[in-house]
Amino acid sequence: MKISVILIVSFLFSTLIFSQPDSKFFEKKGEVYFKFSIAEKEEINILTRIISIDNVVGNIVYAYANEEEFNEFLSLGYEYEVLRSPGDVDDVQMSSSLEELGLWDSYPPYDAYINMMYQFESDYSSICKVVDAGNTVQGRKILFVKISDNVNERETEPQFMYSSTMHGDETTGFVLMLRLIDSLLSSYGNDTRITNLVNNIEIWINPNANPDGTYHGGNNTVNGATRYNANNKDLNRNFPDPAEGQYPTGPWQPETIAMINLAQQYNFILSANFHGGTEVVNYPWDTWSRFHPDDNWFQFISHKYADTVQAHSPSTYMNGFDDGITNGYAWYRVVGGRQDFFTYFERGRELTIEISDTKLLPASFLPAHWEYNKRSFLNYIESCLFGIRGVVTDTVGNPLKALVKIAGHDFDNSEIFSDSVSGNYHRLIYSGNYNLTFSAPGFFDTIITNVSVNNLSTTILNVELIPESPVPVELVFFSAKVNGNMVSLSCETVSEINNRGFEIERVSSLTSSIQNWIKIGYLNGFGTTTEKNNYSFVDKEIPSGKYLYRLKQIDFDENYKYSQEIEVDVKPVSFSLEQNYPNPFNPTTKIEFSIPEKSYVKVKVFDILGNLVSILKSEELDAGVHKLNFDGSKFSSGIYYYSIETVGFRSVKKMLLLK
Ligand SMILES: [Zn+2]
């Protein structure tokens, strides 16, 4: 009897709390968790822009929303049910010391988490370094550890990243990542496989990408954790999106900016972000239905993760979807997701791995989930050693940032770049034969055909790019000076190889688009010399106007190369009024005049009797050549006069309108 009373009371209590979230509710929690049903899968494409969809099971949608998002959702008229927040777990097991945390069956208070990260660095300083990627909204830390044999260097090695808990209430990966760090560090030198990974890969691990969400209930508990950050925004909807642009859901959050900055500073070729709420390996794209060019590789790598997990866990673990994996869009559309950002904009490859049906997993289940996933964690890191890889350099061994493109295969930004600092590239790809093109500005494209690669194996292909042409003549400057209607050109070389000389070319700015450059002069070169040489040339009696000049450097083998173009403005040396054109005209004609300095100018039109019929211009004009249009369509045929008046100059000309 007593039990049923408690049940009724708690039922009423939860109904009261969770039925209608109001402003007070949002003030405390920031977000609401709810479910509703849809009639058509397509409805998700609209809904995903409004609320944060968490899961779709059949026609039931589970979602989160902040107050603004929820109000927008309400206006759509769906019937919904508010659910208990997954982060509200009263009896969560928190560790009281680093030793207790090291048993991996409790959650760390915030300070213990930070201390543990720095403890890793001090205990294993030769292979581990903490990288502070920035602060959250509330000033907590977004920390990575970098694990590598030469930890203070950037080597010709792939950079790999794990990150967890960007949804603050999905905490399983948080503790599992701390445990993975501990395992990698403590096994280095003892375990051959782990030693090999640390020696050959830069491994970056960020256990918690949204600590404000995880510690929403305070620094000493993860009870009360939220999905969103402290601004009530879903960080996994906040990244630049291939289909929706830079800001798919509003301005970037500080946590997003920290991650983007890190992504741009380094060159992560492979990464994963860990979530909870279901058990599945999710691969790109999230934002559109077409498949990634490397869809077969994504399926292969995802199945490999899931298959290994399934072999070491109960038959109910990670067994849904397509045998534990899913294409992102096929599950439900996400815009602003991190995996699409890394895969599209950063040319990496990222998976979203959901590792526990329960978001805030009871801590006593953490060791079991470690057992299920630990092999796959290592396999996935190891896979960045496979595929086609090598170093791109110039002919003297300097590393080059080159585009590595597979003909007939790459699109949607699937081509990659070699690293600008070390020149290494890593093309993860499904087994097959491929033609690779390496290109970099200033170098000839290098095409290497029929490169064969097998799954889980490595094809090494180092590439040397040849400069397009050795610079035979090093021009340090090329300049022009206008003096009246003369243009003085000068240039200086610091070295010349095989230089026959320079042709000087000119084109009017007005006609440069049709490329009618004319040769106006020639300067003899000095052949081959390491001496400094000066050249000059004067272009005389040029009509006023704007011009471009360039040099065509020609060697003794008739190879040539153009210099940059320089523009000059030749001002008129005197006032003038030109004859109109056409003349006679019907009904319009052009009137051109020149003024050598800034002047107040009036241009008038009179009829044959001297009556003023039109004022074409009455204003201050800059020095130069000016053109006006006269439209005679309202006037009768006959002789007209046009005049220019300015201080110290007056001129009149006659024109004939013939209708
Ligand atoms: Zn999530």
Image (cartoon, rainbow, N blue to C red):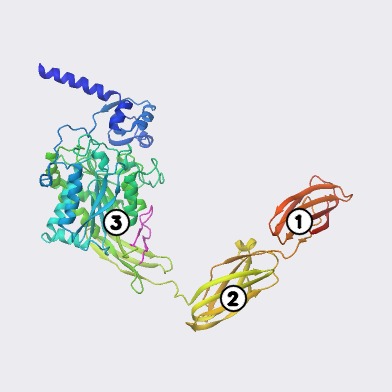
Q: Amino acid at mark 2?
A: Glu
Q: Which residue is mark 2?
A: 503
- x%, y% of residue 633? 79, 46
**Label 3 vs label 2: CA separation?**
49 Å
Element carrying mark 1: strand
Mark 1 or 2 closer to N-term? 2
* Residue 604 higher or lower than 333, as above or below: below
Q: Residues within 10 Å of mark 1 (few under 14, many from 20)?
A: some
- Residue 410 is covered by the magenta coloring: yes
From where the camera sits, is residue 307 visible? no
Q: Amino acid at mark 1?
A: Ile
Q: Nearer the viewer, residue 371 or 311?
A: 371
Q: Amino acid at mark 3?
A: Ile
**Label 1 vs label 3: CA separation?**
64 Å
Element carrying mark 2: strand
Main SS of the magenta segment?
loop
Point out the image quarter for the N terminus.
Answer: top left
- Most extreme residue toward the right is 609
Residue at (17, 49) in percent of width and height: 116
Q: Nearer the viewer, residue 288 or 540?
A: 540
Q: Which residues are magenta?
A: 400-419
Q: Which residue is mark 1?
A: 591
**Label 1 vs label 2: CA separation?**
36 Å
